Image (cartoon, rainbow, N blue to C red):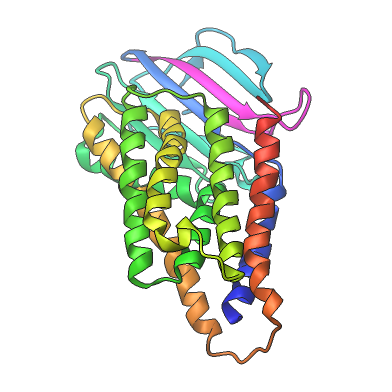
Amino acid sequence: MKRALLISALLAALAPGVFGHEVRPAYLELHQTAPETYDVLWKVPGQGENLRFGLYVEFPAACTNVTPPRGSMVNNAFSERWTMKCPGGLTGGTIHIAGLSATVVDVLVRVEHPDGSAQVTRLTPSAPSFIVEAVPGALGVARTYTVLGIGHILTGIDHLLFILALLIITGGGWKLVKTVTAFTVSHSITLTLATLGYVHIPQRPVEATIALSIVFVAAEIVRGRRGRKGITARAPWVVAFSFGLMHGLGFASGLSEAGLPVGHIPTALLFFSIGVETGHFLFIGVVLSLIALARRVKLPAPQWVRLIPPYAIGSVAMFWVIQRISVF
């Protein structure tokens, strides 16, 4: 009973992110075409028709534009392209995103070097600047892609709700370990295949199916609460493995934004997956800790309270299904 109330409170805390308008990260790409010349792509999320976030890139003072910025508004995102020259190159220089600290937007940055290697980083309102590095080594790639993986899962509320639903239906313990392991193995398969280009499925059907998977598990929880155990209660690892294949395609979309650095593809792919799993277990650890804490509090509640979490999860997921199908 206490667990049901706690999970209901957790869902309420997630509600603003669930129903709020999705804010995609801004994107800055710098492609070095010569020792001192860079092609720049700057994409900023829109805020409705012909409106955009007030985010602007500040390069080192010595940099000058070779061509004027060419801007356009497409798919609720404002894009600019131009070429600039920086005497001595950008290595060691600081790039700052003006206005970022006053928003809730992140910025994904990719700096491509002539040899095909790349520096990838993520800027946040609390850290709006970064220093351009020389050609990154394996350790730098591992650190960057681990952070990207953690950030992707902790901001992916649909993936977290699926994990929460699995946690509820398994009740924790060894069954949860086997279920999460099956989910990990399956989404790692499709994440790898999709990222390397062996599998390609349009993203919108993938996102709708991910939402539908949450509806299915939520319905299974309700069925179990009423004394009729379904396949998810009897063999949750089978369901987790099956739907994990589709969730892996969703994770691949997050990795495709950053791309894979030439020369470090296995390292980037491995540590992005490790980051995703780290995010999973951080979330599970927080939920289990809160449940353990709630068990110490004596709080009477009627039996119907146990149905609130699955109905809340299922309702949110069904909203996503309808929303995502409507944009096909």
Q: Between 282 and 55, which is closer to the camera in this rendering?
A: 282
131 w.r.t. 298: above or below = above
In this picture, residue 207 sits left or right of residue 236 = right
The quadrant in which residue 322 appears is top right
107 w.r.t. 126: above or below = above
Q: Between 149 and 96, which is closer to the camera in this rendering?
A: 149
* Image x and y of residue 49, in percent: 78, 24
* Image x and y of residue 281, in percent: 39, 61
* Rendered residue at 50%/48% (across/down): 127
Part of the protein shown in magenta: 36-57
| Quadrant the N terminus occupies | bottom right
Q: Between 194 and 97, which is closer to the camera in this rendering?
A: 194
* Image x and y of residue 5, in percent: 64, 76
* Rendered residue at 41%/58% (across/down): 236
**Residue 145 seen from this side:** no
* Rendered residue at 33%/64% (across/down): 177
* Image x and y of residue 273, in percent: 33, 44
257 w.r.t. 2: above or below = above
Query: Does residue 44 show up magenta in the picture?
Result: yes
